[in-house]
Image (cartoon, rainbow, N blue to C red):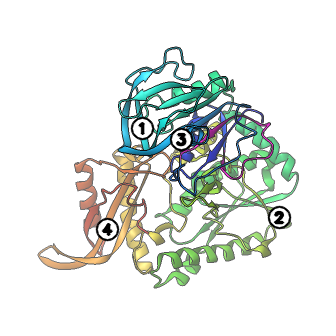
Amino acid sequence: MQNKVLILDFGSQYTQLIGRRVRELNIFSEIKPYNKVPETLSDYKAVILSGSPLSVRGDDAAHPDLSNIRGKMPLLGICYGAQYLAHFNGGNVAKSNTREYGRANLSYVKDGSVFFEGIGKGSQVWMSHADTIKELPENTTLLASTDDVEYASYKFENEATYGIQFHPEVYHSTDGKQLLENFLVNIAGMEQTWTPDAFVEKTVAELKEKIGDEKVILGLSGGVDSSVAAVLLHRAIGKNLHCIFVNNGLLRKNEFASVLQQYEGMGLNVKGVDASARFLDDLEGESDPETKRKTIGRVFVEVFDDESQLVDNAQWLAQGTIYPDVIESVSATGGPSATIKSHHNVGGLPDYMKLKVVEPLKMLFKDEVRRVGASLGIDKALLGRHPFPGPGLAIRILGDITREKVAILQEVDHIFIQGLRDWELYDDVWQAGAMLLPVNSVGVMGDERTYEKCVALRAVESTDGMTADWVNLPYEFLQKTSNDIINKVPGVNRVVYDISSKPPATIEWE
């Protein structure tokens, strides 16, 4: 593939957004740590340097070797990247006298700039930096300014090297997508051919060649990622794909049966394994969140291993791992730290299973997985399902786990989620769920004093889960949902609604 963008990550919280925005232009992007520049760059047609929490003035400044990039292919430095290109080429970067964070508007745009084609004065941009460029290097041209940031954008003369001190990848930069398109298409000459259909065709061919006639086992979760991975593999190897769907006793109400039925309608070879008693026995009385996760992961591996042994001569393990799980990021201290996360349904398989791993979605972002699923003809209802944590309701029960608490939360969750569907609010929410809190509160029901459980409802809107805002659900809906829960779920006498955003809060409570 000789039409890729290389994004060098300096540890910015927005690096994944750069990758996603480039993909939205139907151009393939790859993210690599700044200190792991690929030795061979022939597959790339442009390079982008990300922002960073570091300062180019610091002793720990990230300082990559760009000798094989600079002047040899189009290069764009964003925020730290722009300051890096200025500072180490004779310019002057200093601590800003004013806090340059948040919305700003372009007050100057150079006429005739290909980089800013279609973008004029007044365009809103998003700033996020403590340092600022005070003086540009020689042989550069100023392209844009804001009222507070004189050198908001510049270009090195006689080469396609650009710098911007704002973030085009965030939605607050209203013409950010246009700016990236100008750089990648008009300047770098890249083709916009990265589409779901093209991905499916290429991936199916690669899977056929890689796997051949060997058997693959896949742990299904009922979620989007594992389902899309299963259909991709099924298209490539057919009956040689063996799917296992494990009921850990912590799924939503009736979910085990309904998901199995849905998979059967998709023509997949799926075996359902009800191991709920085994999970709940091992979790009984456990309250530590990390121990809950480890227990669930351990028991899953045991159950999965037992079942995989029944698939004669299985050679491969398939996982629904997606790109954010495998991107290597750079920490704020400047040291590279691999953040490779085990897929929640396999929890890190032990060496004794001796299976080769295949991850057909490992280069896709979440929204791309859904688009690929649509290209494969997967039902919209499945593709539109809210994300659900791998440990299930275990991390939505704060405190110790008991069968009684699981049953209570399943009923509460069912009323909440079904209500969102009935009120046609489900598709307006990215993720929703209920938390069973480890507190009892006083109530009055039928002239009698009660001392029962409190549940918290949570609904957020997001694009990828990295940031999220709480959803302003209608008061009438919340009122009816609260009444239904208290009247229909024994043991609950109080309902609250979580109105915290991420950050600073997380989406889940544990």
Q: Amino acid at mark 2?
A: Ala
Question: With respect to residue 300, does 370 lie above or below?
Answer: above
Q: Identify the element where label 1 is drawn.
A: strand
Which residue appears farthest toward the top when viewing the image? 112
Question: With respect to residue 351, does 56 lie above or below?
Answer: above
Label 1 vs label 3, nearer the camera? 3
For label 2, the crowd category at 10 Å Cα-Cα, with few meaning under 14, some 14 to 19 and many 20 or more, is some
Position of the C terminus by quadrant: bottom left
Q: Identify the element where label 4 is drawn.
A: strand
**Chain-order first, disc 4 or disc 1:** 1
Q: Which residues are magenta?
A: 31-51
Q: Which residue is mark 3?
A: 83
Give left or right: position of 464 versus 148.
right
- Of 62 and 166, which appears nearest the observer? 62
Question: Where's residue 89, x and y in %?
Answer: 61, 38
Q: Which residue is mark 4?
A: 455
Alpha-carbon distance for marks 4 and 1? 38 Å
Q: Amino acid at mark 1?
A: Trp
Q: Identify the element where label 3 is drawn.
A: helix
Label 4 vs label 3, nearer the camera? 3
**Quadrant in the rendering for residue 450:** bottom left
| Residue drawn where x is 51% and y is 40% of the image | 92
- Of 171 and 384, which appears nearest the observer? 171
Circle number at residue 475? none
Label 2 vs label 1, nearer the camera? 1
Position of the N terminus by quadrant: top right
Q: Which residue is mark 2?
A: 314
Say whether residue 267 is visible: no
Q: Which residue is mark 1?
A: 126
**Chain-order first, disc 1 or disc 3:** 3
Alpha-carbon distance for marks 2 and 3? 52 Å
